[in-house]
Amino acid sequence: MYVIETQDLTKYYNRGKIKALESVSLRVEKGKIFSLLGPNGAGKTTLIKLLLGIVFPTRGSGALLGKHISDHSSHSRIGYLAENHRFPEFLTARQILFYYGRMSGVENAILNEKTPQLLKMVKLEKWGDTKIRKFSKGMLQRMGIAQSLTNDPDLLFFDEPTDGIDPVGRREIRDILKSLRDQGKTIFLNSHLLSEVERISDEVAILKDGRLIQQGSVEEFISVKQQYKLQVEDRKQALQPLCQEMNIPLMSQNSHYIVSVTDDAHLNQLIDKMRGEQITIQGIVPRKISLEDFFIDVIEDKQEITQ
């Protein structure tokens, strides 16, 4: 089942002069953590606003939980944590949950039962009667997650939930998100902390200049090719034409070269040909590709030496 679906979703501003989003089609399965990546100005916030019905598309369509994005009845099953969210500082944590819970249509009896559970889940049970103004950044972020859960939503939108948080706080929030996924909830995550995204996401999409340019699992992205760092003595400058001949991407990095091969057999073929060209191999080290490496290559449209 797809919890989020879009087809050709497009948004123009200023009578078509500004293209914020162009023909975005994606699907997000139930019970997954889906992360949206992209540089500033890529259209991430616009996409979230379109999905939540805050702005209207120029063309295209979308659905949340099986209902068209223009049908706001689905919002009762959605939770949202905005970036740089603010709470009334004169309220306590417990009062915050009641305040937002009531705005979401949750009855007092249910909130009386759920509030202690939510505070415990985000490790704020000892701070329930403390005013928000005394909370640290990490505590406020966890409070925001608790607030987004007052209506027991099936779908959650989190915009930069770990922004400005120390490593311990990021781990705590990461554990909370995994727990929510294990409960069957779907999480749409917008974050620029790629190391965090890599650790928790089931699927990732990358936006660039308003267009969806990649979508897939983290494993698919970081295992597209095997990479090795080579240290060689190449007096005849034979490595570059050799890689061109074998259609092997080659990049220069300081005094080393980075080659991308499909498998070990491909690497062995390259090594045999390098020896035939009298290229001295001084070292070969496997190079792990991170999601950040993949993201930067895609966004910068990095060109290898062989191209």
Image (cartoon, rainbow, N blue to C red):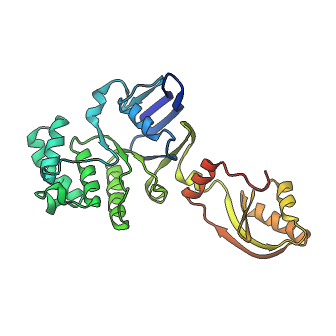
Counting from the top left corner in percent of width and height, residue 235 is at 88, 72
Q: Is residue 208 left or right of residue 55?
A: right
Q: Nearer the viewer, residue 209 or 128?
A: 209
Residue 145 vertical position relative to residue 255 in the rendered view, above or below: above
The residue depicted at 15 percent of the width and 61 percent of the height is: 127
Residue 107 vertical position relative to residue 269 in the rendered view, above or below: above
Instruction: Count up the numbered dots.
Output: 0
Counting from the top left corner in percent of width and height, residue 243 is at 82, 59
The residue depicted at 34 percent of the width and 67 percent of the height is: 168
Counting from the top left corner in percent of width and height, residue 69 is at 38, 27
The residue depicted at 24 percent of the width and 57 percent of the height is: 122
Q: Is residue 136 left or right of residue 116?
A: right
Q: Is residue 244 left or right of residue 5?
A: right
Residue 266: image quadrant is bottom right
Residue 127 vertical position relative to residue 255 in the rendered view, above or below: above
Q: Report if residue 293 is visible in the image.
A: yes
Residue 171 vertical position relative to residue 50 in the rendered view, above or below: below
Q: Quadrant of the N terminus?
A: top left
The residue depicted at 11 percent of the width and 38 percent of the height is: 107
Q: Which of 11 and 197 is in front in this view?
A: 11
Q: Report if residue 1 is visible in the image.
A: no
Counting from the top left corner in percent of width and height, residue 116 is at 14, 54
